[in-house]
Amino acid sequence: MDASGKLVMESILESKASTLLEFLAGLRGNLLESVYHGETGVRLLRELVRSYLTIVEDQSRVMNRLKALYRSWGIACAGRDVYYIRHRAQWLEKLREPGVRRRAERLYEQLDGMQRLRRMARHDLLVESRKHSISSKLRQIPYVGPIRAALLIALLQTPHRFRTKRQLWAYSGLALEMHTSGDYDNRDGQLRRSKKVVSIRGLNKDHNHDLKGLFKGVATMASVRPGPFQNFYQRLLAKGMKPAMARLTLARKIAAITLTLWKKGESFDAEKLKQQAACASLLETSASPPILRKMTSRFCEMLGFEGEYDYGL
């Protein structure tokens, strides 16, 4: 080995030695932090969920292409009748051009294949999700069915990844962005916080998109259908909150309830939501002195109304 090769080897050894020393120093001083690498018990379920979501996405693309074909020829195709087998002959007759009709037939064949694959993927997904005991607990949440429960298990893997509900909100894309690049400025050579009023910049962009879509779907469905969550949504609207913010608050509440039930292994109880709503209204209608509001809050905690399901934001 020449001189240059020896220098390279010496530098590599020195860097490895310094890295090892830093690791030992951190281990001795208890400065190392654990890193989450995922749960091995849900690996099969995660792969089945990925397969199912991919098939659903591909099927949606085929359906959009089919409708786009009819619309390109000026044929209105609102609704879902254009996809049904019993109505296909009628829809194909509207296409006068032979080549366009042949193209629509191929899209219908592709749609039939995707529907068959989706049924198979759905069956495998449900069979595997039943092996997890928490699946039955999650299905008790209104409008969280078997498919959504399986998605929650696969996407979250374990609730202990999140110490608080706010960490889950950030992972789900439901956290509020409050900081900007102009929060600090340079004054006399020192970095100081700006005196500008802090404003909301929207929701965080770094998140799990599938999980955000799941919670948004549950919140949207729960806001328009009867149930305990619709009552919660209507109370937010009665307070003057905009519908979009009310649905966001509802999605955050559903996420917080999911985390609480999963960590404690409890069953969903709609009565706790009613009790919390009563305490919330009591806090809002109490007199303005802070001491009285604090006493009312402590009274609700003594009754056990607070702490079970996190209320609101």
Image: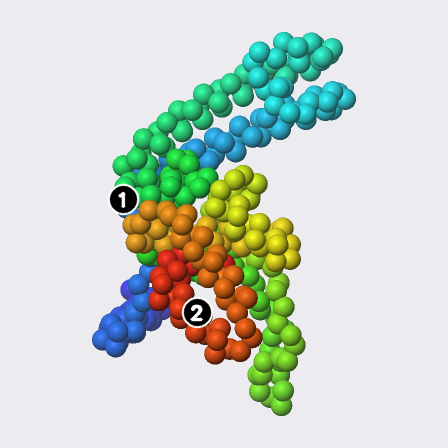
Query: Is the residue 311 above or below the residue 65 in the image?
Result: below
Residue at the spot of label 2: 297
- Give the side of residue 201 with respect to residue 307, left or right: right
Q: Please provide percent x and percent y for residue 65.
A: 63, 26
Amino acid type, callout 2 = Ser
Q: Residue at x 73, y 22 (%)?
A: 76
Query: Is the residue 123 above or below the residue 18 in the image?
Result: above
In which quadrant of the rendered image does the N terminus lie?
Answer: bottom left
> Crowding near pointer 2: few (<14 within 10 Å), some, many (20+)?
some
Q: Quick one: label 2 or label 1, which is nearer the N terminus?
A: 1
Q: Please provide percent x and percent y for residue 195.
A: 64, 80
> Crowding near pointer 1: few (<14 within 10 Å), some, many (20+)?
few
Nearest the eye: 3 or 79? 79
Nearest the eye: 22 or 243? 243
Amino acid type, callout 1 = Gly
Residue at the spot of label 1: 41
